[in-house]
Image: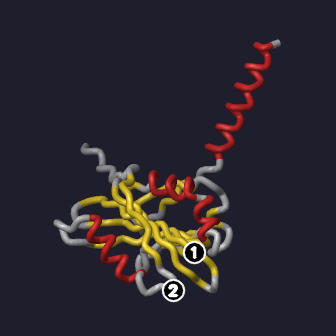
Amino acid sequence: MKLSKFFFSLAIGAFLAVSILAQTRTFSDANVEYTFDLPNPTWKIAANPSEINPNVEYVYGDKMDGFLEVRKLTVKADELVSETIAAEESKLKFMQGYVAGKDEQFGGALSGRVFNFEYIRSARNMSGRFYFLKSNDTTVYVLRFTGERDKLRSIRNQTDSIARTFEIKKISSPDPK
């Protein structure tokens, strides 16, 4: 009896693991040099990249629930990620009710830092979680997540997952013949 319960529990666990993995989608586009995984089908593309505008935007159901902008920044070769964060923060300080949060180390396919902050929009408490991921000496990608404070906090595991899987596409060299 206990053995059959064990196998039943194991089967249920395997089914749930497969169903969770089946929900993951990978973003990739010919107009950008990066990819990332979307852990939930609720993420819908709001702006596709093009040759003219390489920016990518996703919405988690509603823009107030979660909004993602991916931006590529060119920085000086000797610039630290903390300096890039300070430059971005100087633009955020003018938002209504802006309160800076902490920034912390972050690691995934690319390493960098995460900067958190809060602000007010349309009488709602909002928050931002920006991932600054350095791909080389002169390039930093910023994954800008914003949304209502409690809703963005509830999908933090997803924002972390997207940032962890963000990586530069591997360039395959042609076969020498």
- Front position in the image: 104 or 166: 104
Q: Which residue ends up furthest to the right in the rendered image?
A: 1
For the C terminus, which image quadrant? top left
- Front position in the image: 90 or 39: 90
Q: Quadrant of residue 64?
A: bottom right
Image coordinates for residue 19, horizontal then vertical, percent: 69, 42
Dot 1 and dot 2 residues touching (CB under 8 Å): no
Q: Residues within 10 Å of mark 1 (few under 14, many from 20)?
A: many
Q: Residues within 10 Å of mark 2 (few under 14, many from 20)?
A: few
| Callout 1: SS | strand
Dot 2 corresponds to which residue? Answer: 96
Q: On the picture, is 57 further left or further right than 7?
A: left
For the N terminus, which image quadrant? top right
Residue drawn where x is 25% and y is 72% of the image: 75
Q: Is residue 26 visible?
A: yes
Type of colouring: secondary structure
* Separation (CA) of disc 1 from disc 2: 10 Å
- Front position in the image: 96 or 37: 96
Q: On the picture, is 168 further left or further right than 148?
A: left
Residue drawn where x is 66% and y is 38% of the image: 18
- Front position in the image: 102 or 37: 102
Residue drawn where x is 55% and y is 58% of the image: 156
Image label count: 2
| Callout 2: SS | loop
Dot 1 corresponds to which residue? Answer: 126
Q: On the picture, is 47 further left or further right than 177?
A: right
Q: Quadrant of residue 61?
A: bottom right
Tell me the kind of residue under disc 1: Met
Image coordinates for residue 4, horizontal then vertical, percent: 79, 16
Tag 2 or tag 1, which sits nearer the N-term? 2
Residue drawn where x is 40% and y is 68% of the image: 142
Image coordinates for residue 34, horizontal then vertical, percent: 41, 60
